[in-house]
Image (cartoon, rainbow, N blue to C red):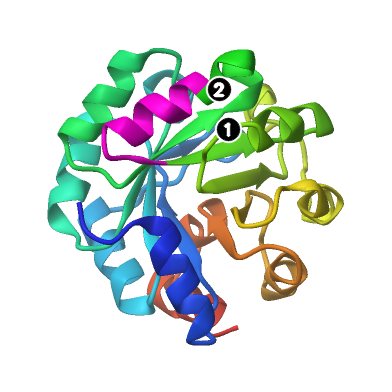
Amino acid sequence: MNFGLSSVIKLRKREGINPIIAEIKAYSPKYGDLLRGDPIKILRAYESAGAVGISYITEPKYFKGNFELFRRICKETDLPVLRKDFIRSKDEIERTSEVEASAVLLITRILGNKTAEFVDYALEHGLETLVEIHSMDDVRIANETKTPMIGINNRDILRLEGDDGTVELTEKLCRYVSDGIVRISESGITSIEDLKRALRCVDAALIGTAFMKAENTEEVVKAFVEG
């Protein structure tokens, strides 16, 4: 593991650069296949464009993720790597740590009152946590944990991205996240204007589908990073 994701986000903010976590995404339940060509080439484009970190969805059934590819991504980059999945067991946290990932996504709507326990377990295993919220009930759960990062998912992940979430939800919930926690807006960010709206109240943005659909990945990501 290299520098923690939350630390790099803070550093980029101080440098006046938009902190963008760029996602390598194989498939969207809404948009279908997104992965065109070699995922490592996409990784290199993200690196060259100035992404603050890399995200990869390992969930196989709905998002066609592949844990072995995640392992390879962790080895191939010096950027912090976030594992996204529907984590329900501590075994999966251990597995994430073993491949030297930097961070793991924990979803409050799945873990409920176990969220704090899972955050502690991940931190003990050298992983930063991005605790995902989508409602005021989720905010209350997340604020009671020791997580360094909270992500506001503009879409309802339990509907598998079937809804058309917008940054309006980020604007609504961000003010209730405890001070000192790195805030990240996730999903539904399709334009630089969306990004600007989000970054008025959060520290970073996680973007996947918009980048995966781009004809010139590096050029588009760079435009978002430079804002």
> Are the two marked residues, 2 and 1, in contact with CB atoms closer than 8 angstroms?
yes
Task: Locate residue 27 relative to residue 56 in the image: left or right.
Answer: right
Please tell me whether residue 110 is drawn above or below residue 46 in the rendered image: above
- Describe the element under mark 1 as helix, strand or loop: loop
Task: Locate residue 77 relative to residue 13 in the image: left or right.
Answer: left
Looking at the image, which is closer to me, 153 or 121? 121
Please tell me whether residue 111 is drawn above or below residue 126 in the rendered image: above
Q: Measured from the top left, where is residue 144 in percent x and y?
A: 65, 32
Residue depicted at x 57% and y 30%: 29
Residue depicted at x 77% and y 44%: 165
Q: Amino acid at mark 1?
A: Thr
Residue depicted at x 69% and y 69%: 199
- Sequence-first disc among 2 and 1: 2
Magenta-highlighted residues:
117-128
Question: Which residue has dot 1 on it?
Answer: 145
- Describe the element under mark 2 as helix, strand or loop: helix
Q: Counting other residues with Cα less than 10 Å from the Cα at mark 1, is it few (<14), some (14-19), or many (20 or more)?
A: some
Q: Measured from the top left, where is residue 196 in percent x and y?
A: 72, 74
Where on the picture, by quarter, is residue 131? top right
Q: Measured from the top left, where is residue 227 in percent x and y?
A: 60, 83
Label 2 vs label 1, nearer the camera? 1
